[in-house]
Amino acid sequence: MRPGYIRFIHFLEKTNELLINAAKQPNPALWLLQHNGRTPFFMLQGLAKIHEAFHNKKKFKKIRNNYFKIIEDGLGQIDYYDFYIKEFEGIITIPKTAIAYLKEQMQKKLTDLNEILIKDGWIDENKSRITCIKEKLEGADWKKEQKEIQLLLDFYDNEIKEIIYFYKKIGNGFTQLEEQVHELRRKLRWLSIYPQAMLGSIQYTNSAHPIAELPKYLTPEILNSPYNIFPEAGSNKYFLLLEKNYFFSLSWMINELGNEKDKGLGIYQLAAALEHTENLDKEKAIARAGEILLGNAKALEQILHYCHTICTGFFKERNLNKLVYGIAEASE
């Protein structure tokens, strides 16, 4: 079997194990969220994105958008509400009516995803959705390992070019949290997900000389993060090599933008609840949410400014341009 197919089967089996257990629960969607159900769907999405560029573009795009992305997005929306409900319940200045509103929204998302899981055959007795996906994968034009790694090199180069282009289009500063900061982070995050999804076909190299700009990214949190440990090489014979320290700088950016994004989306989340429960207009609701959560009515503006500042340095240093080292072959 070709390595591309084996990777999909690996994560489909992990997904299937979770779905079998979820089907036994009174609330399958919530159980999946609580048992790390998003991770294999992230991996499967990542593999599908990669293989859209390799071969059978329409097939893999359909599989990604119609199957994996729908479930991962659904779990993400539930996680979104669950995270902020837990955060807000510990803040006595947040009205209970606002938290009740968020709980209602979370329940709606749970209901929606549970309906999809049943309707689309993810948790039926015949495992029809998983079976359908496997059948589609069997007919794909899988590449040999050496060719696949060359295509992966081209894929990374193109992804990085698209990210740099996206950032340059933003201009002189961030003005939108979701469409700019959050979207940029999503794009960066995929670069860190692919090594996990590729099961050992992507490895580190330490060839780069020490760079003055890099130490600020090499914090203990980043150096000790389990997310920055790549899968072992295993039986793979060809590898895409990424510069370790530049990958760590990428990881720092993802983490830092994530922290700021969480603060900003928290303001939007609370503001939406205040709009619905206290008849505030959007602008006043955002200002009040900023005051409650961060002690500053203009906190959102400060978040956007800080995100632009760190991104300016990161892209000026051309860290993404230096991320990919090349291809290596396993020694006998």
Image (cartoon, grey):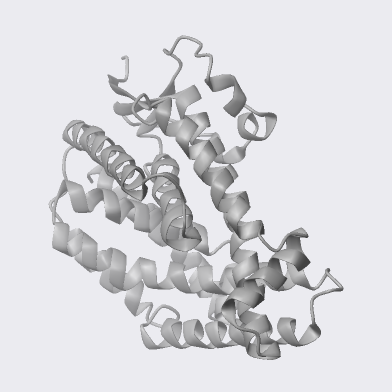
Q: How many marks?
A: 0
In percent of the image, x 20 and y 66: which residue is there?
A: 136
Viewer-side residue, 100 vs 265: 265
Residue 297 shows in the view? yes
- Where is residue 249 drawn, in percent x and y? 51, 30
Position of the C terminus by quadrant: top left
In percent of the image, x 39 and y 61: which residue is there?
A: 12
- Where is residue 54 drawn, in percent x and y? 17, 46
- Which quadrant holds residue 224? top right
- Where is residue 158 drawn, in percent x and y? 23, 40
Q: As drawn, is 26 to the left or to the right of 132?
A: right
Q: As drawn, is 258 to the left or to the right of 154?
A: right
Position of residue 15 relative to residue 314, above or below, is: below
- Which quadrant holds residue 234? top left
In percent of the image, x 67 and y 69: which residue is there?
A: 287
Viewer-side residue, 278 vs 225: 278
In percent of the image, x 47 and y 74: which residue is there?
A: 74
